[in-house]
Image (spheres, helix red, strand yellow):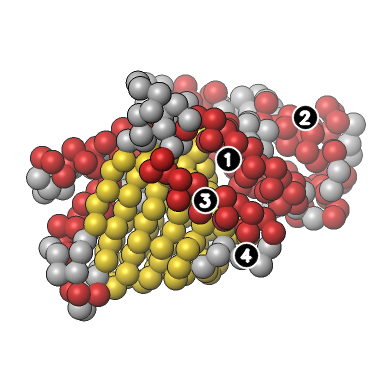
Amino acid sequence: MSPAAKLPTNSISAAPGADCRRASQLFAETLDPVFRTTIATPERIDDFRAALSTYFMGPALFFVADMLGTTYTFSRDSARIARSGLDLILVQRTLDGSDLRTVNGVTMQVEAGDVSIFDLTRPLHTETQHCRNLTLVLPRHLLFGTDVQNDALHGLLFKRSTSTARLIGSHLCALFEDLPDITQAEAPTIVTATANLVTNLVAPAIAERQQPSPAVRGAVIMEIRRYIEQHIATTDLGPDHLCKMFGLSRASLYRLFEPIGGVTDYIRTRRLRAAFDMLANDRKRGVGEVAYACGFADISAFSRAFRHQFGMSPSEVRDMGDRGPLSLGPAEKQSATSVHDWLRFVGSL
């Protein structure tokens, strides 16, 4: 690699009057590992615009998306999470327009100037008719290491009036302006510096989310949650076990976990999430092996709980196959495949 080599890029766009169907298809195919993208047929061809530019920065990807003239829907469900196996974080700054996003059953409006963070191991649904945004895609460990609960990251929204949104947003805009001049040799250092900036600015919001209410603020519940994550395979991990380990009465333990749904439900949810991640990322492991590794002694009970939680059986997640190719030309397929390869590379870091 030449020290002066520029960043590899990939761009697709639909100019006014272009073949909307083909442009929509390529737009959707390029984003396929991340979202199931649905683009409604525009009422006026001349109003339709779908443009997507991707910059490969080594340990990160930078997307610039421009959508106008029809309804765009982006969905990431359990099936797509399992199929893609991407453990990545999106940091996004909305430049123009707005969209509606549903995260954990809550719908939020994201407007121009807002900064949002999303976890690709969690479901997400977005709908927009006019939006332009910048998105930095990073491996989780570059931002938050392994100490932060996934639920504390997903759906973080900083409104444009906050200092956090202004500082992160202005940095992403400056990065966007400099992308054509950044070399491959410079990119890793720039990505690390950007990740450090984001981590430090959003840390207070993450800390707030990890402490669900004033009643559970403090070290005790955080220590218990860390213990649960580290001992997820222990079959007798439950209220009695935790009371003994931490010297708590049952009543005290129940009060601590009441704001987040109760200790038994919390343990079961964490076990199921661990099982989902294992099945999605290591398809050679059998369902029974994964169940036991996550503390389930009864495979049938595990399968029922898994389907209830995710709407899919453990086998369906493990055996999730790739979607068949769209009817695109060879050059177009190769263009989309390049972005898929970049996503897999960043996800493997």
SS under mark 3: helix
Judged left or right of residue 128, residue 322 is: left
Kind of residue indicated by mark 1? Thr
Residue, disc 4: 159
Q: Which residue is mark 2?
A: 241
- Disc 1, disc 3: CB below 8 Å? no
* Sequence-first tag of 3 and 2: 3
Tell me if residue 230 comes above or below residue 136 in the rendering: above
Q: Cα distance, mark 2 to mark 4? A: 42 Å
Q: Earlier in the sequence, mark 2 or mark 1?
A: 1
Q: Nearer the viewer, mark 1 or mark 3?
A: 3
Whether residue 318 is visible here, answered yes or no, is: no
Image quadrant where residue 297 sits: top right
Mark 4 or mark 3: which comes first in sequence?
4
Residue in the picture at 83% in, 49% down? 216
Residue beneath label 3, please? 174
Query: According to the image, label 1 marks what residue?
Result: 194
Q: Given contact means CB atoms under 8 Å apart, are the residues at marks 3 and 2 in contact?
A: no
Residue type at numbered disc 3: Ala
Q: Is residue 217 left or right of residue 143?
A: right
- The numbered mark, 1 or 3, whose residue comes first in the sequence reads 3
Residue 116 at x, y percent in the picture: 56, 56
Residue 214 visible in image: yes
